[in-house]
Image (cartoon, helix red, strand yellow):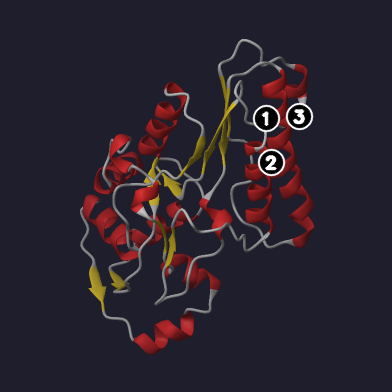
């Protein structure tokens, strides 16, 4: 996908194309805006169009929970239901949403479109904010007792969901997530426990939390954003619990 040679190759003979190419982490740098749209939108739409014209039966597109906007600040919770309309907060989210919507329009009786809108995906070797959190966990003997809830999905659960979508030739929009919501403090405490360390969850003054809640990094760490469970049908594909996933990551880090 990087050098453009994919345009010279035929997708004929393949049942499914699973498109995961894209820029995955947010940048506020305006100079990168065109690149986000070129890769996250134009490349994805072009790939889907070629797959359809080459006779592929199904196209699975990696969209994202980011299309529903930023996390809510401390004390508030964003719950995404089937009635919730996408509302991107930046050009990263908008570039993913534009591709998501355009690719849906390609669906017909001979071309199945499956849109995956996962939350944070984590697992051994993952990138982004999750490994930064685990890096912090190595040293976080004391961690603030802040209540929040986040939808996440372990990589094995996500790939099992994709497998079921492909094997079942299922079209539509999918919202895969773990069977349980997770608080940031639970990620820290669980990872430390799996690596043989204890954690003191300390009370955190509300006035300080309220002051810090306007900070974007603080909001990313302790904000709340979840999919309603009825969107996800988690029991079908959750092959690992949150604790099992964290255990595997801890073992991989040793």
Q: Which residue is disc 2 drawn over?
A: 102
Q: Earlier in the sequence, mark 3 or mark 1?
A: 3
For residue 229, the mark is none
Closer-to-camera residue (10/133): 10
Residue 180 position in % (x across, y down): 29, 52
Closer to the eye: label 3 or 2 = 2
Q: Quadrant where the C terminus lies? A: top left
Q: Secondary structure at mark 2?
A: helix
- Determine if residue 20 is in view: yes
Q: Quadrant where the N terminus lies? A: top right
Q: Residues within 10 Å of mark 1 (few under 14, many from 20)?
A: many
Q: Residue furthest bottom?
A: 207
Q: Earlier in the sequence, mark 2 or mark 1?
A: 1
Q: What distance separates the C-alpha of mark 2 from that of mark 1?
A: 10 Å
Q: How many discs mark residues in the rendered view? A: 3
Q: Secondary structure at mark 1?
A: helix
Q: Secondary structure at mark 3?
A: loop
Q: Residues within 10 Å of mark 2 (few under 14, many from 20)?
A: some
Taking 129 as reference, is 139 left or right?
A: left
Residue 172 position in % (x across, y down): 51, 37
The residue lying at 47 percent from left, 29 percent from top is: 170
Q: Which residue is disc 1 drawn over?
A: 48
Residue 236 position in % (x across, y down): 30, 35
> Does residue 32 sit above or below 102 in this rendering?
below
Closer to the eye: label 3 or 1 = 1
Q: Residues within 10 Å of mark 3 (few under 14, many from 20)?
A: few
């Amino acid at each position: 996908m990087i050098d453009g040679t994919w345009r010279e190759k035929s997708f004929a003979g393949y049942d499914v194309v699973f498109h995961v190419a894209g820029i995955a982490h947010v940048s506020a740098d305006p100079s990168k805006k065109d690149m986000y749209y070129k890769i996250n939108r134009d490349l994805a739409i072009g790939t889907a169009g070629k797959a359809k014209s080459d006779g592929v039966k199904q196209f699975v597109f990696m969209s994202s929970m980011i299309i529903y906007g930023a996390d809510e600040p401390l004390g508030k919770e964003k719950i995404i239901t089937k009635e919730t309309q996408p509302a991107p907060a930046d050009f990263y989210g908008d570039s993913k949403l534009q591709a998501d919507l355009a690719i849906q329009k390609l669906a017909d009786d001979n071309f199945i479109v499956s849109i995956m809108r996962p939350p944070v995906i984590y697992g051994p070797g993952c990138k982004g904010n999750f490994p930064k959190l685990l890096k912090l966990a190595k040293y976080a003997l004391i961690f603030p007792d802040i209540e929040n809830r986040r939808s996440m999905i372990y990589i094995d659960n996500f790939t099992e969901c994709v497998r079921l979508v492909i094997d079942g030739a299922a079209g539509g929009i999918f919202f895969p997530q773990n069977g349980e919501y997770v608080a940031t403090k639970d990620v820290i405490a669980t990872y430390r426990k799996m690596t043989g360390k204890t954690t003191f969850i300390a009370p955190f003054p509300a006035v300080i939390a309220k002051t810090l809640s306007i900070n974007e990094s603080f909001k990313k760490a302790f904000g709340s954003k979840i999919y309603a469970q009825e969107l996800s049908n988690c029991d079908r594909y959750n092959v690992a619990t949150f604790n099992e996933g964290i255990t595997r990551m801890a073992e991989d880090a040793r």
